[in-house]
Image: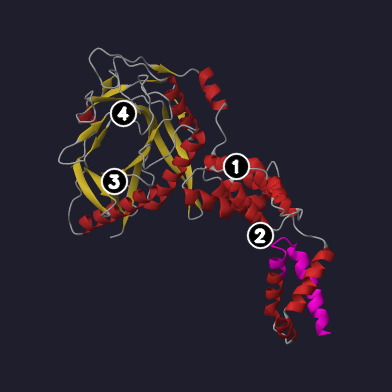
Amino acid sequence: MRFEAVIGLEIHAQLLTESKLFCGCSTKFGNPPNTNICPVCMGHPGVLPILNKKAVEFTIRMGLATSCTINKYSIFARKNYFYPDLPKGYQISQYELPLCSNGYLEIEHQNQRKKIRINRIHLEEDAGKSIHDQGNFTLLDFNRCGVPLIEIVTAPDIQTPEEAGIFLSEIRQIVKYLGICDGNMEEGSLRCDANVSIREAGSNILGTKTEVKNMNSIKNVVDALKYEIERQIEIVSSGGRIIQQTLLWNADKQIIEPMRTKEESHDYRYFPEPDLPIVEVNEEWLNVIRENLPELPSIRKERMKSQYNIPDYDIEILTTEKEFADYFEETAKFTDDYKSISNWFMTEILKILNEQKISIKEFPIKPEYLGELIKLINNQTISGKIAKEVFNEMLVEPGSPSEIIKEKNLIQISDEKIIEEIVQKVIESNQKQVQQYLEGKDKVFAHFVGQVMRETKGKANPSLVNKILKEKLDNLRK
């Protein structure tokens, strides 16, 4: 029997608001434990929540970016469950009437476009954090309690782990472009749970699903889903039965581990949050949010491809992060050699970012200086080799490449008479290699080029060096 997987994702994105969803506490990550808390987010008796308007706006942005219906009215509910890091004993979330519903996102896999439906995007507060690795006890950090999250719930339209990985990558890219989430999965600001089941290929009947949690990277999502699909197929093929339960992905051991029997929605005893009014999104506010949406990744890709006429591969890399594309386009204001900008970015800049573990915002060379450097190469003021030296100087002492070239006397030698004299001197000093060249060993030509460049400390115009050397050596063959 041949099986196929049915996968739905629940993606939580922590919103980049300065304060929490229902109080004024800071949302800053990394502060000392239990310092970003107050009676409201700790659920003390008698406190009242006040909704963060910016969090509502960020949720609407995501809804618009994924073609959702933005519901004019939505309500909050109490989701009741007990867990040590949930001090209220309930979570304020949205259930029956979310802010956004019935959207979709198109992904591309194996050169085919596929539409993944989004059932809902709702707003809710986060729980705290349990820390289990400090000894034979559990520590609780409540700083995260009340931090605003959006939950993006897909329809079961995903069929392979690879599709799930692509969808999650697209969502991560969109929230970062919108400026509503930093997308950092390792720090937990973007988290993904997956509901997965198997069925006989071609059947419309859904199998029993399991939920896989604890996946803090896109690779972990793909690996965990592959493992769980294979596990379910093995159980069913051997006559067993899938139990509906919540599972944890152990990335170190590359295995799935059971966590608890899966709850149904009625287990949470949802009821309307009595301390919060109905959220109303009027048309005027919605239009303001829509008009201020930034250019989305898919649109930017197409525009940049058309505007700059560089290969698709380059565009994919440059638009991976909004800040990458911003850096490229800012540099393009100072030179129209767009392919060179892309080459420098992919070969030199990305290498520095990875080696130094910094973001493009922390990269010391300004776009205008990279553009100027490319111009200096193209007008033959400096050679490509000297440009690398100037580039490295700018990494240490950020400044204009023209100033560095002038200060270090790195201007390219393009005077044919000077180069001819140096070439003649090199030929006279390397008679053994001259003889080899005359005997037809053309590979020795590179030796002469290297000697000339050494004599000029890399400043000679390479094309002129090659031209003059070839003329002089070929004249000796006559």
Quadrant (top left, top right, bottom left, bottom right) of the N terminus: bottom left
Q: Which residue is mark 4?
A: 143
Which quadrant of the structure image shows residue 131?
top left
Q: Amino acid at mark 3?
A: Leu
The question of residue 475 being in magenta is answered with yes
Q: Amino acid at mark 1?
A: Tyr
Residues at discs 3 and 4 in contact (Cβ within 8 Å): no
N-terminal label among 4 and 1: 4
Q: Which residue is mark 3?
A: 206
Q: Which residues are magenta?
A: 452-478
Residue sitting at x 40%, y 23%: 19
Query: SS of the residue at dot 2?
Result: helix
Q: Which residue is mark 1?
A: 327
N-terminal label among 1 and 2: 1
Q: Is residue 313 visible?
A: no
Dominant secondary-structure state across the stretch colored magenta:
helix
Q: Amino acid at mark 2?
A: Lys
Q: Which residue is mark 2?
A: 385
N-terminal label among 3 and 4: 4
